[in-house]
């Protein structure tokens, strides 16, 4: 493989990750639209057999996680193209905090902790479940803003755009209202 072909493959891989980020935002937003925010213990108790609600909540959990995972993978990969050295993810975060793509390392870690709790905690206490989902919902706008800033970074600094425009219009509409 030539160096040009290798560089093209790396750029194409990042473009695919950018499209995945847009898709994650689109589907997380769709799942969030089907949820009565803010959730309360009473709502969850009264609708404990409401399959639509709990499918939407499961989707919020999964899509929030996928969005953060996709962003993390794309940030790490973009550093390969930019020539930045980052041998640990905390260094990746520090670089993107410096570039103002993420608001702060701490905010990223808070979202990561919330994401990890969702993956490993199976609560039946509806007050705790409501608190968890409300926390994810409150962290979502920052994740959307980070996704938007990251795509702007990739376009302006690396000249890499999402692989296709399939989710671009919706992504811009969803993230346009976020001023972070």
Image: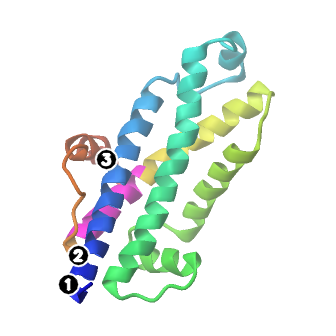
Residue plotted at (28% across, 63% down):
15
Find out whether the residues at labels 3 and 2 contact each other: C-beta distance under 8 Å: no
| Residue placed under numbered mark 3 in the picture | 175
Q: Position of residue 4 (x, y in %)?
A: 20, 84
Q: Is residue 77 above or below residue 33?
A: below
Could you say whether the residue bearing mark 2 is in a helix, strand or loop?
A: helix
| Residue 102 in sight | no
Quadrant of the rendering where the N terminus is positioned: bottom left
Image coordinates of residue 102 in percent, x first then y, are: 44, 66
Mark 1 Cα within 10 Å, few/some/many (few <14, many 20+)? few
User: Which of 129/82 is in front?
Assistant: 82
Q: Which residue is mark 1?
A: 4
Answer with left or right where residue 127 lies relative to residue 98.
Answer: right
Alpha-carbon distance for marks 1 and 2? Answer: 6 Å
**Disc 3 element:** helix
Q: Which mark is residue 94?
A: none
In percent of width and height, residue 96 lies at 43, 74
Rounded to the nearest angstrom, the CA distance separating label 3 from label 2 is 28 Å
- Is 148 in the magenta? yes
Task: Name the image quarter holding the C terminus.
Answer: bottom left
User: Which disc number belongs to residue 8?
Assistant: 2
Report the magenta residues as a range.
144-155
Which of 81/109 is in front?
A: 81
Residue 179 in the image: above or below residue 104: above
Mark in front: 3 vs 2: 2
């Amino acid at each position: 493989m030539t160096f040009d072909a290798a560089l093209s493959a790396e750029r194409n891989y990042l473009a695919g990750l950018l499209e995945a980020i847009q898709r994650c935002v689109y589907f997380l937003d769709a799942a969030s639209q089907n949820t009565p925010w803010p959730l309360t213990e009473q709502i969850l108790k009264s609708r404990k057999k409401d399959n639509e609600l709990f499918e939407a909540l499961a989707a919020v959990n999964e899509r929030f996680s996928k969005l953060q995972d996709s962003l993390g993978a794309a940030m790490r990969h973009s550093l390969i193209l930019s020539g930045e050295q980052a041998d640990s993810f905390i260094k990746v975060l520090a670089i993107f905090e410096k570039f103002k793509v993420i608001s702060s390392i701490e905010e990223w870690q808070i979202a990561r902790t919330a994401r990890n709790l969702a993956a490993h905690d199976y609560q039946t206490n509806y007050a705790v479940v409501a608190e968890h989902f409300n926390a994810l919902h409150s962290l979502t706008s920052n994740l959307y803003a980070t996704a938007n800033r990251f795509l702007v970074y990739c376009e302006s600094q690396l000249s890499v755009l999402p692989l296709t425009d399939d989710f671009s219009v919706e992504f811009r509409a969803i993230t346009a209202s976020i001023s972070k």
